[in-house]
Image (tube, grey):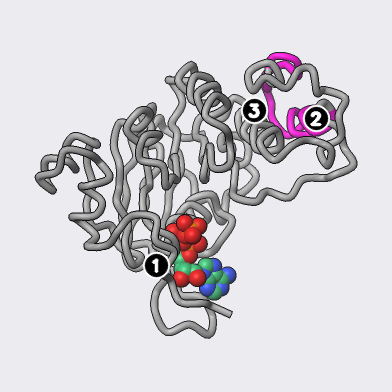
């Protein structure tokens, strides 16, 4: 097994160049994420956030560079990594015909010591929907279920991509509270939402054009940029307005 590394995730010089593209989507990113911290990956559309976490999760092969997750190579040691990692990705496609309960039970079967089905559904306030098919849930409920599925195996490391996008304000707060209750886990949170990052993250990497352009606590980033809010720091450090979807089409 692993020899209790102090780093939960150690990514070195990660680079991803997609086929038929001329620039690196991820361009020499190194991240050291400590065990037990909630680490935010923040950046505008197309900055390279999802590509980065997909490489960390072993879902995409880096063009170059390497990742260790609890000392394991996520690409080579997939079976072992699956037991210690929970992933909620954007636009997760789940089996529409299965109910919430059936999906949770399916995911429970992947892990050695999962949470109970009711407990998990309770955590994301979907207990009353246990017998509802996935296709019949609202967008926000589907999102909450995908969070539950990422957490059901009590994974040591959890990757959450766009955690609360599309949730209404009270649902966001409920999800945040559920996450705050899981403080001992290492959480990698990909986000656009500054309030979410400020509330949940111990440290943040700000990504722009596939590179880490600043890293530190939210307070460090504000100080570094001479800004009073994280959003102002983002604008100052990246030189662009936040949340502009101004990437060129990639068809
Ligand atoms: N499969 C792919 N093939 C080609 N290019 C891709 C592919 N996936 C992503 N890209 C490109 O790589 C760059 C980084 O994309 P990525 O999805 O990692 O960014 P992101 O920061 O997660 O964006 P968003 O916030 O919009 O989800 C973008 O320019 C995107 O168009």
Name the residue at 30% across, 42% down. 204
Mark 1 or mark 3: name the one nearer the start of the chain: 1
Mark 1 or mark 2: name the one nearer the start of the chain: 1
Residue 233 visible in image: yes
Q: CA distance from mark 2 to mark 3?
A: 16 Å
- Residue in the foreground of this view, choosing between 115 and 230: 230
The C terminus: image quadrant: bottom right
Q: Position of residue 177 (x, y in %)?
A: 49, 19
Q: Which residues are magenta?
A: 102-119
Q: Position of residue 76 (x, y in %)?
A: 57, 55
Q: Residues within 10 Å of mark 3 (few under 14, many from 20)?
A: many
Report which residue position mark 3 lands on: 153
The total of numbered circles placed on residues is 3
Asked if the magenta segment contains residue 103, the reply would be yes
Q: CA distance from mark 1 to mark 3?
A: 30 Å
Mark 2 or mark 3: name the one nearer the start of the chain: 2
User: In this rendering, is residue 206 above or below 122?
Assistant: below
Q: Position of residue 17 (x, y in %)?
A: 45, 75
Which image quarter: residue 94?
top right
Residue 100's disc is 2
Residue 15's disc is 1
Name the residue at 58% across, 26% down. 171
* Left or right: where 96 falls relative to 174: right
Residue 51's disc is none
Q: Nearer the viewer, mark 1 or mark 2?
A: 2
Where disc 1 sits, the SS reads: strand
* Left or right: where 152 falls relative to 26: right
Name the residue at 58% across, 49% down. 77
Name the residue at 56% across, 61% down. 60
User: In this rendering, is residue 36 above or below 207?
Assistant: above
Asked if the magenta segment contains residue 188, the reply would be no
């Amino acid at each position: 097994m692993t020899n209790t590394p102090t780093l939960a995730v150690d990514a070195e010089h990660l680079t991803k160049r997609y086929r038929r593209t001329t620039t690196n989507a991820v361009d020499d990113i190194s991240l050291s994420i400590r065990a037990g911290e909630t680490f935010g990956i923040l950046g505008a559309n197309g900055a390279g956030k999802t590509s980065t976490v997909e490489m960390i999760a072993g879902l995409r092969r880096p063009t170059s560079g390497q990742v260790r997750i609890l000392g394991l190579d996520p690409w080579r040691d997939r079976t072992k990594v699956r037991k210690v990692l929970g992933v909620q990705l954007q636009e997760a496609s789940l089996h529409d015909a299965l109910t919430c309960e059936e999906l949770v039970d399916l995911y429970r079967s992947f892990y050695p010591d999962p949470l109970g089905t009711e407990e998990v559904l309770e955590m994301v306030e979907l207990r009353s929907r246990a017998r509802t098919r996935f296709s019949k849930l609202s967008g926000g409920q589907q999102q909450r279920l995908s969070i539950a599925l990422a957490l059901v195996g009590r994974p040591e490391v959890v990757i959450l991509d766009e955690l609360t996008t599309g949730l209404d304000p009270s649902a966001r707060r409920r999800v945040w509270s559920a996450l705050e209750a899981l403080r001992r886990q290492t959480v990698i949170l990909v986000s656009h939402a500054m309030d979410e990052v400020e509330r949940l993250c111990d440290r943040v990497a700000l990504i722009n054009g596939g590179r880490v352009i600043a890293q530190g606590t939210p307070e460090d980033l504000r100080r570094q940029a001479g800004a009073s809010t994280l959003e102002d720091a983002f604008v100052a450090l990246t030189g662009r307005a936040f949340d502009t979807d101004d990437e060129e089409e990639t068809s």
